[in-house]
């Protein structure tokens, strides 16, 4: 495989993952709306441009062997600037108790981010150019459905 075609495949995979992440955000927001936890404005803040169907065929992916079932917890938060405005595009790094980054995501235009985590202790790091980094501690306990990081 040539280097160019490998880079094209990486770009294609990245696009598919971005679209999937947007679909998960949209589904979560719709669930929140149905449960009375979200507003229609929150739904409008989700980038749905990547949800439009493309003509490109979807690659076939072999499903991994099933793992033992673990219940993920919906963990979410918001990032605001010093003047209390939502921060778009901030990097949110989730670090486990072994000091490994297990998830990296970005904030949307409402400053919101979302992750699904196993029970445990995590450090949440917010990073944005021209802003000092900030940190939060998240203790995700078994048996809960969601946890908001303030």
Image (cartoon, helix red, strand yellow):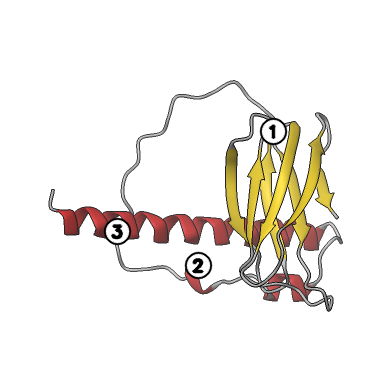
Question: Camera-side residue: 114 or 30?
Answer: 114
User: Tag 3 or tag 2, which sits nearer the N-term?
Assistant: 2
Question: Residue 98 appears in which quarter of the rendering?
Answer: top right
Q: Secondary structure at mark 2?
A: helix
Residue 14 in the image: above or below residue 146: below
User: Tag 2 or tag 1, which sits nearer the N-term?
Assistant: 2
Q: Residues within 10 Å of mark 3 (few under 14, many from 20)?
A: few
Residue 63 percent across, percent down from the top left = 41, 33
Residue 89 percent across, percent down from the top left = 61, 69
User: Tag 3 or tag 1, which sits nearer the N-term?
Assistant: 3
Q: Secondary structure at mark 1?
A: loop
Residue that carries the numbered disc 1 in the rendered image:
118
Residue that carries the numbered disc 3 in the rendered image:
57
Residue 102 in the image: above or below residue 15: above
Distance between the Cα atoms at labels 1 and 2? Answer: 27 Å
Q: Secondary structure at mark 3?
A: loop
Quadrant, the C terminus: bottom right
Judge from the rendering whether residue 59 lies leftward or rightward of residue 51; answer left or right.
left
Residue 105 in the image: above or below residue 131: above
Distance between the Cα atoms at labels 1 and 3? Answer: 33 Å
Q: Which mark is residue 51?
A: 2
């Amino acid at each position: 495989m040539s280097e160019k075609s490998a880079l094209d495949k990486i770009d294609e995979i990245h696009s598919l993952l971005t679209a999937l992440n947007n679909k998960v955000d949209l589904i979560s927001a719709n669930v929140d709306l149905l449960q009375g936890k979200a507003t229609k404005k929150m739904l409008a803040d989700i980038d749905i441009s990547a949800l439009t169907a493309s003509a490109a065929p979807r690659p076939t992916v072999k499903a991994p062997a099933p793992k033992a079932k673990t219940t993920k917890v919906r963990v979410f938060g918001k990032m605001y600037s010093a003047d209390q405005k939502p921060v778009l595009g901030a990097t949110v790094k989730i670090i486990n108790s072994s000091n490994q980054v297990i998830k990296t995501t970005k904030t949307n235009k409402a400053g919101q981010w979302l992750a699904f985590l196993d029970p445990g202790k995590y450090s949440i790091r917010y990073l944005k150019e021209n802003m000092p980094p900030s940190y939060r501690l998240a203790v995700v306990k078994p048996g809960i459905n969601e946890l908001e990081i303030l």
